[in-house]
Amino acid sequence: MPLQLIRNDITKMRVDAIVNAANPSLLGGGGVDGAIHRAAGPQLLAACRRLGGCQVGQARLTRGYDLPCKYVIHTVGPIWQGGAHGERAQLASCYRSALALAASHRCKTVAFPLISSGVYGYPKAQALQVALETIAEFLSGHDMTVYIVVFDRDAVQVSSKLFQNITAYIDDVYADAHADPAGRFRQLPAAPVGGFAEEAASFAPPPRTAMRPSVAHPGLDAMLAQLDESFTQMLLRLIDEKHISDADCYKKANIDRRLFHKIRSNPHYKPSKQTALALAVALELSLEQTRELLMKAGFALSHSDKGDIVVEYCIRQRIYNIIEINQVLFKLDLQPLGY
Ligand code: APR
């Protein structure tokens, strides 16, 4: 998944480069700057001394020394002054400069803290939005995996309205599903003869005699010959019908280009449920189409799975921004869509 929101201590990240939220002197400080210098050891400070400082919105690179990453990219975020002093543009420039420097050093994996959202006072929700938008824009043209490493869950402020609506929807649906897990007491209207009973029979396991090996069943052969459209075939048909490119699709789904090409090149590929759902969101499918595409991969939406309920809610509300959906999933400690 090219853009991931995770909770961790950035000094523990085993990536090509971590980004430091530094100050113009580059001589260390508190917060993440202090944590990185402590973990990297004294050689980092010596290297930073040789850099001679850094301007706001710019980025400089050193080795990682005792850190588990190859490089540290030091950038200096804006100090929040209320938002009318160009802070947003300066903060976006931090992400762009750091990503450009990482790309020029052939970094494939980069981890950012939420720059300026600590000592420098940038409101966390806005700082996160700038980070997500700027990184997503960069990833639309580059192959890289970027982690936004948040130190505390409340740093991820999803829109409270959306969050309230989704948690209320989960409470309704999830509780209901758990009140009657087998659906024994629901959805079983008195089936008219030849109605539900007949349909149920068609799903009942075939009588034992039918299981005995015997000559090939011509009916079965015919059925096998008319296999339904596979997941890949349905996916590619929908991409054509929506008149979008493959790249638009996998970027919007926040899945890796290589994974998409694995799916595209194998007509019988079975993706993970998170990948199938990410593609359904990217294609802006209806709930029915999503269920059909999911079924092709061997999955179903379940009201016993909170992550599925979040996705179902968003699709019903036509919320197809995968980053927004993943922020809600992150906030609820549920697995994000993508991969
Ligand atoms: N891993 C990940 N994130 C962290 C870590 C960590 N180990 N430590 C702190 N953070 C988070 C904070 O919770 C905050 O959300 O990093 C974000 C940035 O906070 P600061 O480190 O305070 O950076 P910033 O707001 O950009 O202020 C920079 O603070 O440390 C000094 O020298 C630095 O003067 C500079 C100023």
Image (tube, helix red, strand yellow):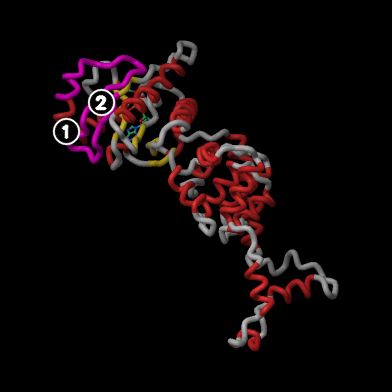
Q: Nearer the viewer, residue 98 or 87?
A: 98
Classify mark 2 as within 8 Å of ligand 1 or not, answering yes or no.
no
Residue at the disc numbered 2: 61
Residue shown at the point (61%, 49%) measured from the top left: 170
Q: Nearer the viewer, residue 234 or 51?
A: 234
Q: Secondary structure at mark 1?
A: loop
Residue at the disc numbered 1: 41
- Could you say where residue 243 lies in the image, as x and y percent from the top left? 63, 38
Instruction: Indicate left or right for 68 with 121 as reference.
Output: left
N-terminal of the two: label 1 or label 2?
A: 1
**Label 2 crowding class (10 Å Cα cut-off): few <14, some 14-19, many 20+?**
many
The magenta segment is 46-74
| Residue type for callout 2 | Leu
Which quarter of the image is occupied by the N terminus?
A: top left
Residue 55 within the segment the image draws in magenta: yes
Residue shown at the point (54%, 38%) measured from the top left: 252
